[in-house]
Amino acid sequence: MATITITLDSTQAQRLQSAFSKQFDLRDADQNPRIATMADIKQHLVRELRAIVQLQERKGAEDTIVSAPFDPA
């Protein structure tokens, strides 16, 4: 299995967490703003990667269908 690792120093990690928190308006159970966890960020990145792969595979399948010859007699 392949692995992707992203290494951040503490300043970069804080900036990333703050940006994600604002971008996705994260809230706690009491609807107070909360800081994104690394688990939140990982979950989002995995969803994005999955969506990119599925979109490209779907486009590839559509290209195959569209390029198939259609020659009614």
Image: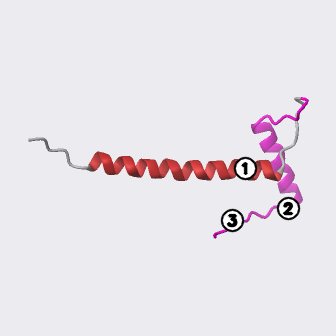
Q: Nearer the viewer, residue 71 or 25?
A: 71
Instruction: Name the residue at 53% across, 53% down.
Output: 53
Q: Secondary structure at mark 3?
A: loop
Q: CA distance from mark 3 to mark 1?
A: 13 Å
> On the picture, is 57 further left or further right than 35?
left
Residue holding disc 3: 4
Q: Secondary structure at mark 1?
A: helix
What stretch of residues is rendered in magenta?
Answer: 1-30
Q: Secondary structure at mark 2?
A: loop
Instruction: Name the residue at 69% across, 65% down.
Output: 4
Residue holding disc 2: 9
Q: Which of the 4 image quarters holds residue 21? A: top right
| Quarter of the C terminus within the rendering | top left
Amino acid at pointer 3: Ile
Residue at the bottom extreme of this rendering: 1
Residue holding disc 1: 43
Eye-nearest disc, 1 or 2? 1
Marked residue nearer the N-terminal end (1 or 2): 2
Label 1 neighbour load within 10 Å: few <14, some 14-19, many 20+: few
Instruction: Name the residue at 87% across, 43% down.
Output: 35
Above or below — where is 7 with respect to 62?
below
Eye-nearest disc, 3 or 2? 3
Residue 10 pos. (x, y %): 89, 58
Amino acid at pointer 2: Asp
Marked residue nearer the N-terminal end (3 or 1): 3
Amino acid at pointer 1: Gln
Residue at the left extreme of this rendering: 73
Residue 39 pos. (x, y %): 80, 52
Residue 61 pos. (x, y %): 39, 50
Residue 19 pos. (x, y %): 79, 43
> On the picture, is 59 further left or further right than 38?
left
Marked residue nearer the N-terminal end (3 or 2): 3
